[in-house]
Image (cartoon, rainbow, N blue to C red):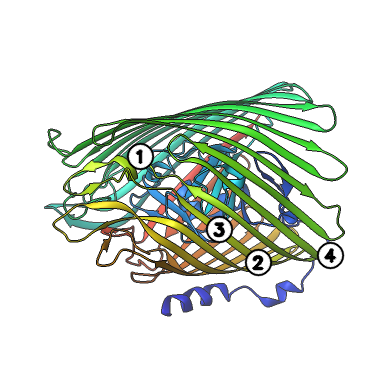
């Protein structure tokens, strides 16, 4: 545990006397926000679920320039990066795979039916994010299919003034390396431009991003562009219209990303277009409705031999059309949420073929606090899929308030993941083939959590048990045959979590935030097929210890963010990052040092990640009113 000792040494720099110190001049408290569900808006302090909120202030203080990098400090979230600078990464929650987690922006699904590898293709820059909500546990009752182990919801800001924004950053290892007969220094840089317009009746936001790098090793260079636009028209205090649109164009070398060691010369081009239109309406004092439509298009061009496109090339085109009608009703007995949604998924692919499926869902949720000291949420999601027929996902969350500061919460619920088109129909011989006979993964999860929240201190400890039926992995009997997707049996996970969060004023113009999270997972596969080689198996985290310490004094801020991770298989590693920032008027300057101790580690097999890396950035944000 030598790495853990480094982390504990760094975190021990927090004086224990801070717990007793109180400021007479600063009344800052841990921010109270409402979870942005599709139907009911619930304060975090009144939620019976395990939910983490990463605020804009926390995002700004972390040594990160992409959503991928921010999420690696989130409790229970397993970010497994292939490419640097946010190019390509997978996200799992509490031992779940990248296909078992659902990602949303303002409650709108960004999942791709081809593969979960595209889940983090998000055009939203960090500057536009108000907060990130992470729901751990079954999310199908709230967000529908494919929220098997959890959900990540990115909530964007609302423009409140006219403003212009510029952000430029560049980084390097400053280390001369020689690979494939060439010698040089690896680097990366980016620039973001944006602005907002805000009047009494309408608000607009537009952001443009351009990033490129020569990678972190041979054939990992990237060239990325992003565009994000958002608006809102406020007709009156009861009716509003919102629009969101985004575009991504990513081109990157994919050495070792998917098929090592033979893919040394591989390359991938990904384009994603997404837009949505939604409106909100307050009908009287009790009814609230919100219809919503969205479309996502993704184009994935994978070139196994980038210098010879006549062979080993895979091209995939997916369309996802979604429509929703969400509603809520307030009564003296509690709040009722209900609604309908439909989702059509299409793919046209060189090695998957042409396929289409339709999904219909109906849901209801009831929340009440009418029983003294109890908060109760119960509901169900009824789903019909054209390939997988009818299924129901019920669940209930109950919490009991003990005095003013303590809360004990329990929840149980079910969820589902429908196989991707890659799981079902891929024909990539001799490497991988799909299995059209796959059935959906279904899970039950049970949680018990004890929470404490007083003034500037929040803490919790909990246990969960998850049981997945028809767990999917890729298997083969020998290296002479391709991998094929199979339903293996049960995947069972026991998990323990502990969290402590302190926000402490230290006097005039000074404050300190300290947070530490520990997560333990004990997963197993039961009834797996004997004598089979598993492609993925169980490679989830076993131990995850994350600690961040931020100190602000006048215009200066200092943050150390540290991670110790140990997987079921693989070598444990400790990564320590640091950011120093200076804010003066409209300018903000920061410097990051990632991987201070130059740790060698892998998150995906055959893809060594960045060693020590230094980044310098400058931001300019001018508000006109």
Name the residue: 55% across, 49% down: 151
Residue 599: x and y in percent read: 35, 67
Residue position for label 4: 404
**The N terminus appears in which quarter of the rendering?**
bottom left
Q: Counting residues from the N terminus, which is met first, the one under dot 1 or under dot 3?
A: 1
Image vertical order of residue 491 relative to residue 585, above or below:
below
Residue appearing at x 25%, y 59% in the figure: 606
Q: Which residue is mark 2?
A: 448
Q: Secondary structure at mark 1?
A: helix
Alpha carbon of mark 4 to alpha carbon of mark 2: how far?
19 Å
User: First in sequence: mark 4 or mark 2?
Assistant: 4
Q: Is residue 343 left or right of residue 204?
A: left
Which of these two is toward me, 311 or 428?
A: 428
Name the residue: 58% across, 76% down.
Answer: 12
Q: Quadrant of residue 525?
A: bottom left
Q: Kindly identify which residue carries mark 1.
A: 421
Distance of mark 4 from mark 1, alpha carbons?
50 Å
């Amino acid at each position: 545990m030598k790495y853990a000792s480094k982390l504990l040494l760094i975190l021990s720099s927090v004086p224990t006397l801070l717990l007793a110190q109180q400021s007479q001049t600063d009344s800052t408290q841990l921010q109270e926000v409402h979870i942005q569900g599709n139907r009911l808006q619930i304060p975090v302090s009144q939620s019976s679920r395990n939910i983490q909120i990463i605020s804009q202030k926390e995002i700004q203080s972390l040594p990160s320039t992409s959503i991928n990098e921010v999420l690696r400090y989130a409790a229970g979230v397993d970010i497994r990066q292939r490419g640097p600078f946010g190019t390509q990464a997978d996200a799992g929650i509490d031992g779940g795979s990248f296909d078992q987690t659902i990602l949303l922006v303002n409650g709108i699904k960004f999942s791709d039916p081809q593969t979960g590898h595209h889940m983090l293709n998000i055009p939203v820059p960090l500057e536009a994010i108000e907060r990130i909500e992470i729901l751990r546990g079954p999310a199908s009752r709230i967000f529908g299919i494919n929220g098997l182990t959890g959900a990540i919801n990115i909530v964007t800001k609302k423009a409140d003034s006219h403003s212009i924004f510029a952000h430029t950053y560049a980084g390097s290892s400053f280390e001369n390396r020689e690979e494939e007969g060439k010698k040089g220094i690896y680097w990366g840089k980016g620039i973001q431009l944006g602005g907002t317009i805000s009047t009494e009746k309408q608000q607009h936001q537009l952001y443009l991003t351009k990033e490129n790098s020569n990678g972190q090793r041979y054939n990992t260079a990237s060239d990325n562009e992003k565009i994000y636009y958002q608006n809102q028209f406020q007709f009156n205090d009861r009716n509003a219209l919102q629009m969101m649109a985004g575009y991504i164009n990513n081109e990157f070398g994919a050495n070792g990303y998917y098929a090592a060691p033979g893919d040394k010369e591989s390359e991938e081009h990904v384009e994603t277009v997404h837009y949505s239109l939604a409106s909100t309406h307050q009908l009287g004092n009790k009814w609230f409705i919100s219809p919503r439509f969205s479309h996502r298009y993704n184009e994935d061009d994978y070139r196994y031999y980038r210098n010879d496109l006549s062979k080993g090339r895979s091209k995939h085109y997916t369309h996802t059309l979604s429509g929703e009608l969400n509603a809520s009703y307030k009564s003296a007995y509690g709040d009722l949420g209900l609604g309908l949604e439909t989702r059509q998924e299409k793919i046209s692919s060189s090695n998957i073929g042409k396929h289409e499926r339709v999904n219909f869902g109906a849901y209801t949720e009831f929340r009440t606090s009418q029983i003294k000291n109890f908060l109760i949420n119960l509901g169900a999601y009824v789903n019909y899929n054209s390939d997988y027929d009818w299924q129901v996902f019920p669940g209930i969350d109950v919490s009991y308030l003990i005095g003013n500061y303590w809360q004990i919460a329990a929840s149980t619920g079910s969820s589902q993941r429908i196989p991707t088109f890659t799981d079902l129909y891929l024909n990539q011989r001799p490497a991988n083939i799909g299995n059209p006979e796959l059935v959906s993964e279904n899970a039950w999860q049970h949680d018990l959590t004890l929470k404490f929240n007083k003034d500037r201190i929040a803490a919790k400890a909990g246990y969960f048990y998850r049981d997945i039926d028809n767990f999917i992995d890729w298997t083969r009997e020998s290296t002479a045959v391709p991998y094929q997707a199979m339903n293996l049996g049960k995947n069972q996970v026991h998990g323990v979590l502990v969290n402590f969060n302190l926000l402490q004023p230290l006097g005039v113009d000074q404050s300190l935030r300290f947070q530490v999270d520990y997560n333990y997972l004990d997963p197993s596969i039961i009834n797996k097929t004997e004598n089979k080689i598993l492609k993925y198996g169980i490679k989830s985290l076993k131990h995850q210890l994350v600690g961040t310490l931020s100190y602000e004094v006048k215009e200066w801020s200092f943050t150390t963010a540290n991670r110790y991770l140990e997987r079921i298989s693989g070598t444990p590693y400790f990564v320590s990052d640091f950011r120093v920032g200076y804010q003066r008027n409209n300018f903000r300057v920061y410097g990051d040092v990632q991987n201070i101790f130059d740790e060698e580690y892998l998150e995906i097999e055959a893809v060594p990640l960045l060693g020590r890396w230094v980044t310098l950035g400058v931001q300019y944000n001018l508000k006109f009113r």
